[in-house]
Amino acid sequence: MKNMKTKQLDRRSFIKVSALAGGGMLIAFYTDNGLLAQQRGPAPAPTPINPNTYIKVHPDNTFTIVAKNPETGQGIRNSLPMIIADEFDVDWKQVKIEQADRDDKYGRDMGAPTVGQIEGGSTATPQNYQPMRNVGATARAMMVAAAAKQWNVPASDVTTGSGIVTHTPTRRTATYASLAQTALTMPVPELSSVKLKDPKDFKIIGKPTPGVDNFAIVTGKPSFSIDVNPPGMLHAVYEKCPVFGGKAVSANLDEIKKLPGVRHAFIVAASPDPTPAPAGAPPAPNVRWASGVAIVADNWWLANNARKSLKPVWDEGPVASQSSAGYLAQAKQLSSTQASQTPAGGTPRSAKEGDAEAAFKTAAKIVEAEYAFPLLSHAPLEPQNSTAHYKDGKLEIWSPSQIPQIANAAVPAGIQNSDVTFHMVRAGGGFGRRLVSEYDIEVSKIARLVTDERAKQGLPSAPVKLLWTREDDIHHDNYRPAGFHYFKAGLDASGKLIAFRDYVASHGTTSVIPANEFPRGFVANFWVSEGQITPYGIPTGALRAPSTNGVSFVMQSFIDEIAVEAGKDPLQYRLDLLANPLVPAPPASPNSFGAPFNAQRAIGVLEAVRDMSGWKNRDKLPKGTGLGTAFQFAHSGYVAYVVEAAVTADKKLKVNKAWAAIDIGSQIVNPSEAANLVQGGFIEAMSHMMAWEITIDRGRVVQNNFSQYQPTRMSQAPPSIEVKFLKTDFTPTGLGEPSLPPAVPAISNAIFAATGIRIRSLPLGNQGYRWT
Amino acid sequence: MAYKLTVNGKSQTVDVPGEMPLLWVLRDVLNMKGTKFGCGIGACGACTVHVGNKAVRACQTPVSTVNADVKTIEGLSTDGSHPLQKAWLEVDVPQCGYCQAGQLMSAAALLASKPKPTDSDIDAAMSGNVCRCGTYLRIREAIHVAANGRKS
Ligand code: FES
Ligand code: FES
């Protein structure tokens, strides 16, 4: 690249401009989320970086903007480029989007010290909103400066719009493309001198903007990871022991290799146990894989068909003695002793304020209830898959991961990170499933072994696609942990909540009450403690809105129960609690990402949803129909629902309508996608309500496919889910997760309002309920 | 064994086992990746194509049983001009988008037999198609838009 200029903008921000072949220019930034580093305390020491590229200015005055994050259906491939384009002051129709590869040059995000390209935790918008604005605004400032220089006029007389610079007094104009050569020779502006738009002048941010891949999707163009098809590709399946932690001992490989179309069949040994890093050295990446049998064939159906003839011998290991029934029995046992010690390996999470035990003795009324929610599988519609090609000591991978990690390809292939080219491909849903990328690890291992085996046979290397079946996906997930909650509440004679106790029996970390969960801080005597179920051999992980996706059900249902016992309006009861914090809240900072619970914002969404839904007229509903409500603070966002549900005497359930009020700050980047995500969160909650449950028998998952793990269907979806975003003065935060959790208790509370029957465990399908 | 198929108006010969599902013939033999795999047991609709004028699950259709012309998402129109494709774009239906090829093919079969479907016609025709992301409200709206033009 010629004319390259690099300038340090601040300690962690760089900008580079260079000429593009054929004219035009490329504007490269390295931002390393410097602002975030300041917000969130010291960042890990930066690794050496190259400037990344965000904007290309083409000679025809169109622009390519890079989407740096993986896309699994939240529309981030729209929203980050939209932010850049708006500040750059070009029209959206002048913009083409290019998906970035996975590369450390894109900086680091919160929560994952080595990755800057994550779909997870509803973090992409809050982490990138400001940096992406800086990128666009700096590029615009360069165009303004170039025009001012070219025309010899003050920059203050120059305006921009649609990729054109205008000298206001003379109406003289120049396209960004025509200014590129001049811009290349100009000093790069200091970030501190770059002016951002006043949000009221946004032309793209805040406008409903259809998905950039929609046309490819509706015309069936290859768009997804499963569609990747490099020349000469072979197709792999990978059969693992149905018992978690089990190992492949042997299999009838010779027989399998003789089946039609089968090219390779081998056992893959489990990853070696990690060796501790020498003192002072950074820990080695924790890349583990399970042993199994790989079958590689000319097409996927032949590979998968060969599994029917496969006779693997497994060493099932110790988990084979575990079952859901055993976990439940242990939860009950733990709760009866209310053990609060932490077993080996567990982490204590407890909160104790005041003296709940003493307060129960003085209470006018005690409410007690046991709640439970099950293990869940994520079940994104595109089964897990990944494609890799190992050749000449290097590996190229095409991955649908939500948190693409180069080490996941390098370690199993036995090569260095620098020998990996990592492409990020659109994924057919994530929901947290693709935060764990075993398929990337497995395909990299298999691709290496295939190329090695082919070399011995005198054959050239071949790319390999590994595709799991739906059954593989349901049997080998990292499940949303189950939770068992034993509640007790004390009310005084006026119905006021004076003591709250929750004993939680669980495992892992993400089904336990977050330490600051409401009503903590709003009740004088509050005590939450937990006991861990052990041994527990089931891998668990994050499902959309980890922890609150189950916790909201139990907490917001039990609060509802308390309100009813107090003889109060359940929505007003919540508002009354929220209005009376034990200690006055400190003034809230406008920076809401990662900020603690803010009762005013919760009150805001509850009042809004009350007014949208006609809550006050709920007594006029016909018999068997009721309104339920719930709210949740999750992933920095505030969501409240009201749901109207109708239930027949024979337990046929219908959701007639739902209303959502949401506060995720001052700006919705793409309102079309945002409303879609909220409706989708509600529809997912309906799956949790009615049908979703993973059970374990002899260390293996009982359910196999959608027939036993039914997602919500079209005919069950309510005719309307009304969504309202409250625009508040807080910084914008994410939306992928917050819409789900309170939808579950809002539905179950509506069932109570309709029938007087309190739902205390999920799913409803086990309790005789069906959708109408 | 060789089978003759007409896919989107083009005749094709494939040499595959007769029990190989049409889904995998399309995806891996004819390299038409628009039709999707979601469950392999007829429970999700991601693989929906037309055989004759009927919407069928390609994962449950052995190639040896295909006795009429096949139409896939690639054949609905290549330029996005089918009224359903236009409506899908107008309503901004997709989230992840993975189910949408199957949704569109089910919707196209519905409109072919019922040009002005009611909500309950739509629910009945579309309930074999899972959308894990939950875009059902927009799918309903887009089918109405395709059938009647913009409502508002
Ligand atoms: S893949 Fe055919 S119905 Fe699911
Ligand atoms: S849009 Fe993701 S499954 Fe339908």
Image (cartoon, grey):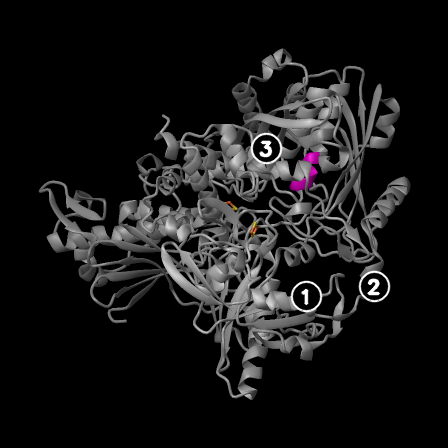
In three-dimensional space, the C-alpha distance between marks 1 and 3, rounded to whole angstroms, equals 36 Å
Q: Is residue B122 left or right of residue B40?
A: left
Q: Amino acid at mark 1?
A: Lys
Q: Can you identify the residue that label 3 sits on?
A: A716
Instruction: Give the label on residue A308, or none.
Output: 1
User: How many numbered marks appear?
Assistant: 3
Count neighbours of disc 1 (C-alpha within 10 A) and say few if under 14, some if 14 to 19, many if 20 or more.
few
Count neighbours of disc 3 (C-alpha within 10 A) and say few if under 14, some if 14 to 19, many if 20 or more.
some
Q: Is residue A125 magenta?
A: no
Q: Can you identify the residue that label 2 sits on?
A: A318
| Residues in magenta, as a range | A548-553
Q: Amino acid at mark 2?
A: Pro
Q: Are marks 1 and 3 on the same chain?
A: yes
Q: Earlier in the sequence, mark 1 or mark 2?
A: 1
Q: Position of residue B72 (x, y in %)?
A: 43, 52
Q: Position of residue A560 (x, y in %)?
A: 71, 25
Helix, strand or loop: magenta stretch? helix
Q: Position of residue A731 (x, y in %)?
A: 47, 39
Q: Secondary structure beneath disc 2?
A: helix
Q: Quadrant of residue A277?
A: bottom right
Q: Position of residue A98 (x, y in %)?
A: 36, 57
Instruction: Give the label on residue B128, or none.
Output: none
In three-dimensional space, the C-alpha distance between marks 2 and 3, rounded to whole angstroms, equals 41 Å
Query: Is A106 drawn above or below residue A752 in the view shown?
Result: below
